[in-house]
Amino acid sequence: MVIHLKVPDDVVRKRSKGKDGKVPESVEQRLKDYHRETMAVTVYFPNADITEIDGTKKPRTVTKNIIEVVKAKFGK
């Protein structure tokens, strides 16, 4: 089972801005790596149980959603 927290790249960039208002170069590289590696999961494991959760919500809501998915899959 894979839980995929969906957060648009522009939201990641906005959250990652430094005090100078710029997005560090490392964030751009990490986004590229992230997209490449998550694509590999779908290519190499086409039958993977991937559940998408909106990662733009408040942390408490995201946590609640993750718990609900895990409970639905594995029970209490």
Image: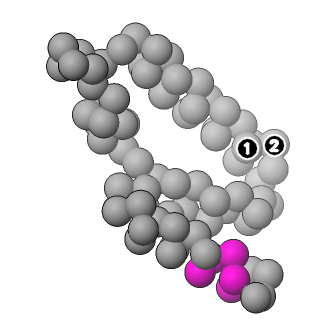
| Residue 50: x %, y % from top left | 67, 62
Q: Is residue 42 magenta?
A: no
Q: Is residue 18 above or below residue 71?
A: above
Q: Nearer the viewer, residue 64 or 27?
A: 64
Local SS, label 2 = helix
| Residue 55: x %, y % from top left | 43, 56
State the residue position of label 2. Answer: 44
Q: Is residue 13 above or below residue 41?
A: above
Local SS, label 1 = helix
Residue 67 horizontal side relative to residue 48, left or right = left
State the residue position of label 1. Answer: 41
Residue 11 horizontal side relative to residue 27, left or right = left
Q: Considering the image in quadrants, where does the C terminus appear?
A: bottom right
Q: Is residue 71 magenta?
A: yes
Quadrant assignment, res 8 = top left
| Residue 63: x %, y % from top left | 51, 67
Farthest left residue in view: 21
The magenta segment: 68-72
Q: Is residue 37 above or below residue 3?
A: above
Q: Residue at x 61, y 66 (%)?
A: 51
Amino acid at the residue labelled 2:
Tyr
Look at the numbered discs 2 and 1 and tell me whether their residues touch, using CB distance below 8 Å: yes
